[in-house]
Image (cartoon, coloured by chain):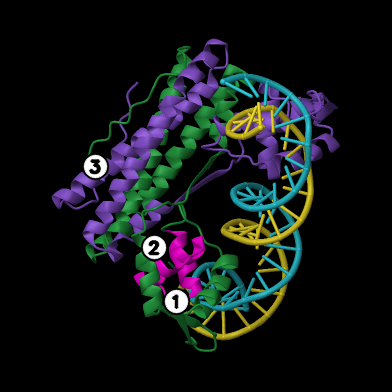
Chain colours: A purple, B green, C yellow, D cyan
Amino acid sequence: MVKLTPTARVILGMLKLGARTGYDIKRVTEFSTRFFWGASYGQIYPELRKLERRGLIEGEHDPRGAIARRAYHLTDAGEAALHEWLTDRENWIFEYRDEQLLRLFFGDLIAHEEVLANVQVTREQWEQTADEFRGIETAALEEADEGQIFPLTALRFGIGFADWMVEWYGQLEERLRSGEPPTQVEKAQSSS
Amino acid sequence: MVKLTPTARVILGMLKLGARTGYDIKRVTEFSTRFFWGASYGQIYPELRKLERRGLIEGEHDPRGAIARRAYHLTDAGEAALHEWLTDRENWIFEYRDEQLLRLFFGDLIAHEEVLANVQVTREQWEQTADEFRGIETAALEEADEGQIFPLTALRFGIGFADWMVEWYGQLEERLRSGEPPTQVEKAQSSS
DNA sequence: TGAGCCATGTAAACGGTTACATGATTCC
DNA sequence: GGAATCATGTAACCGTTTACATGGCTCA
């Protein structure tokens, strides 16, 4: 079983999907997986070196004019490691850190109107995020027409997620405003 | 404006809510904020020292028999810093890292049945998480009766969140099974 | 000619987890 | 007597972000 660092996972996948350089990988992740799986240059370039030393990828000097560019592709061992990771169902990383929820958790320590103001800006922020996600839907739809459908599926996840946030904070807002106890159970009732 | 590290934020809040020792803080976060704001001993103890040096908290030697215990409480400066942080609406930390969603994003690289198996275990995992959250509801309800209602609100967030995940993955599962395109938009329609 | 993009890389700092080390107390 | 819990703390390691540094290419 080949051990892959978090950044190695997204690198191998992106190379398989068509990215070739470190710059490429950064650019593509920036408008696709950024929301749930980021990668910075400080990780990407050293990781590409390590993956090549381990024989999972191969790089070739591929200058663009005078720009020294290094283009990578998966080796057979790299393909195998990628497939192994993609079908591994043992345990996986899920990290969630939400400062507004922490502030809400401590809501008993501040005034009612202060909680309400926090809730309101949080809802507004998620509305903005939902809009941003919807703004890149067209690009994902075109990609889907060319056969890559799952990036669109992941984007739809993001849209649904942001919409749920807007809903949840919106309802909490209403309850706080009306003076009802803010502790009703929410039931997710998604429809397609 | 007093600068607080991420761990300092949860420490100040927990001290205000009644926790007294580093051990206390760890124990309380473990069954309350763990899901969205963790803290480990390796962070807590050094941070308590730093906060005391900065005059935001004060510790007193408070042995329990022969056990050397140090009990902390907020100073006026600490109370002010906590309030300032709780009402700051400028910018906040939101981090989301989801390996199953990354695998889904790369779904075009593996077989249809392999994607389906991933989706299924993800849904099952979230069902389990939702159950776990519901399992601590009673404790949160008691706490709410004593006047602390927002920890319960945060827990209800977690339950709604997990339920939404179950819904979303469940619907994707159905579509993958039926051969429909897995790209319909989900609309969150929460009801109280 | 200048802005913006293409392209690669490193160093420092930061934050976090894990593992290790120690030992008393409580309760069955 | 032994297990679980109370209690504190450090060292090593890991992964990530940010800032810095460099410089060519493209197009208006």
Residue on which disc 1 sits:
B56
At 47% from the left and 35% from the top, the residue drawn is B124
The vertical placement of B138 against B13, above or below, is above
Left of B60 or right of it: where is A115?
left
Q: What residue type is labelled 1?
A: Leu
Residue B58 falls within the magenta-colored stretch: no
Query: Circle 3 sits in a helix, a strand or a loop, which is it?
Result: helix
* Image marks 1 and 3: residues in contact by CB distance under 8 Å: no
**Residue at 48% across / 65% down in the picture?**
B4
The magenta segment is: B2-31
The amino acid pointed to by label 3 is: Gln
Find disc 3 in the rendering and name its residue: A171
- Gap between marks 1 and 3, in whole Å? 36 Å
Along the line of sight, the residue nearer the viewer: A116 or B177: A116
Residue drawn at x 31%, y 55% as measured from the top left: B152
Amino acid type, label 2: Trp
Task: Find numbered disc 2 in the image and state the secondary structure of the residue it sits on.
Answer: helix
Above or below for C21 versus B42: below
Task: Find residue A42 and report its image quarter.
Answer: top right
Is B10 included in the stretch rendered in magenta? yes
Residue A3 pos. (x, y %): 74, 40
Subunit that carries the residue with mark 3:
A
Residue B26 locus on image (x, y percent): 49, 66
Does the rendering let one see residue B164?
A: no
**Residue beneath disc 2:** B85
Q: Is residue B59 visible?
A: yes
